[in-house]
Amino acid sequence: MDKKQEYEAMREKKISSKEVFKGQVLDVFDDEIELPDGRHSHREVIRHCQAAAILAFNNKGEVLLEDQFRYPYDSILTEIPAGKADPNEDPLTTARRELEEETGYQAKQMEELGLFYPSVGYTDEVIHLFVASDLVKTHQHLDEGEYLSYYFLPLKEVLKKAENGEINDGKTLAALLHYVLLKKNN
Amino acid sequence: MDKKQEYEAMREKKISSKEVFKGQVLDVFDDEIELPDGRHSHREVIRHCQAAAILAFNNKGEVLLEDQFRYPYDSILTEIPAGKADPNEDPLTTARRELEEETGYQAKQMEELGLFYPSVGYTDEVIHLFVASDLVKTHQHLDEGEYLSYYFLPLKEVLKKAENGEINDGKTLAALLHYVLLKKNN
């Protein structure tokens, strides 16, 4: 079976879609679908906009990290800078904007590393992962109600934190994997 | 400032919580909170149970992967086996159960690699990542309406797929990072 046949054989087809919750951040849909065997079922999906996350390095090769209180976990988590795209914004623009808003750094160099799908069962969210360097300090301008502290840490220590379970944030782990694989082959 | 003081200074305190959507898979809550500066705000949170994901190796050092149609992305995604915990189930039991249900393999060796937080802004979901080996074939028993194909691939090719953007699933990328870091240090 080729890829197209496999896709058709496994495909769940949308029959109808109903918005069942519309919040300030989350929109939840309950879609009626047709399974490959013809039976009908339902899928609950959070439709979310795209986002960008940035693994940024200073000239000493240290990684820019943020500590931020994350309400769902009732704790301060360590992450790379990230944020949601504005409507119709391309991912590179989102990445540049969020990096500067959250940390007050512009990056002269920025390249896409890959994509990160946070939770493939129930959201269509895509986070575009970037690596940035050649940083220039400008001004931080956080959203209202946003509090975070940022700092630089050597890559080796960041990887140690990932390994030790001090960094569990998904987009941060995914960006680190991409960077480690990239460096291994260059 | 020590960790405890930092936590108190950044903490968002829950004032009240209201369930605004209860679906078959998703429960959405709208919580009223108090920000560190005393103002009130809201946080939308998906309260989700825990889950487990398994990076399983056969005796040739090949990785067990699944191709599964993922409705939110309207495409077939490549992932490691994973699934949600039953009520009060410990993560290791979830991992053993899901591995066998989805692929028909029991693992004689299974160790926790770390945790994966899919989307720290709006869900409290935690996926426990495991590495498994010493596989014994038994019987696959998929949930109703669940279709997937599984196969083994050399680790090198799996990492290549991650690097090339053929694997974007977050839990899979996080498990691979943990494994790569573990092997580097051993």
Image (cartoon, coloured by chain):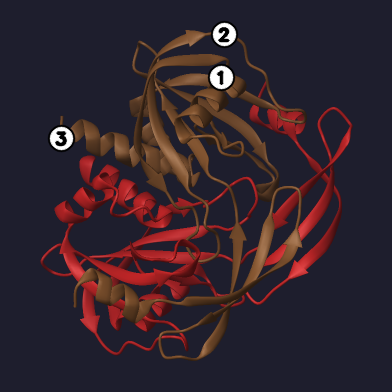
Chain colours: A brown, B red
Answer whether residue A170 is visible to the viewer in this image.
yes
Q: What is the x, y in percent for residue A96?
A: 50, 24
Q: Give coordinates of residue B184: x percent, y percent.
A: 22, 41
Near mark 3 (Cα within 10 A), the count class, few <14, some 14-19 or many ≥20, is few
Q: Amino acid at mark 3?
A: Asn
Q: What's the distance in space between the residues labelled 2 and 3, CA to CA?
A: 34 Å
Q: Are marks 1 and 3 in contact (CB under 8 Å)?
A: no
For the C terminus of chain A, the image quarter is top left
Q: Earlier in the sequence, mark 1 or mark 3?
A: 1
Q: State the residue at coordinates (15%, 35%).
A: A185
Q: Is residue A167 left or right of residue B14?
A: left
Residue shown at 76% from the left, 32% from the top: B8
Name the residue carrying label 3. Answer: A185
Which amino acid does the dot numbered 2 rest on?
Thr
- Left-right relation of B1 to B58: right
The answer to whether A18 is drawn above or below residue B35 in the figure is below
Label 1 sits on residue: A100
Q: Secondary structure at mark 1?
A: helix
Residue bearing mark 2: A138
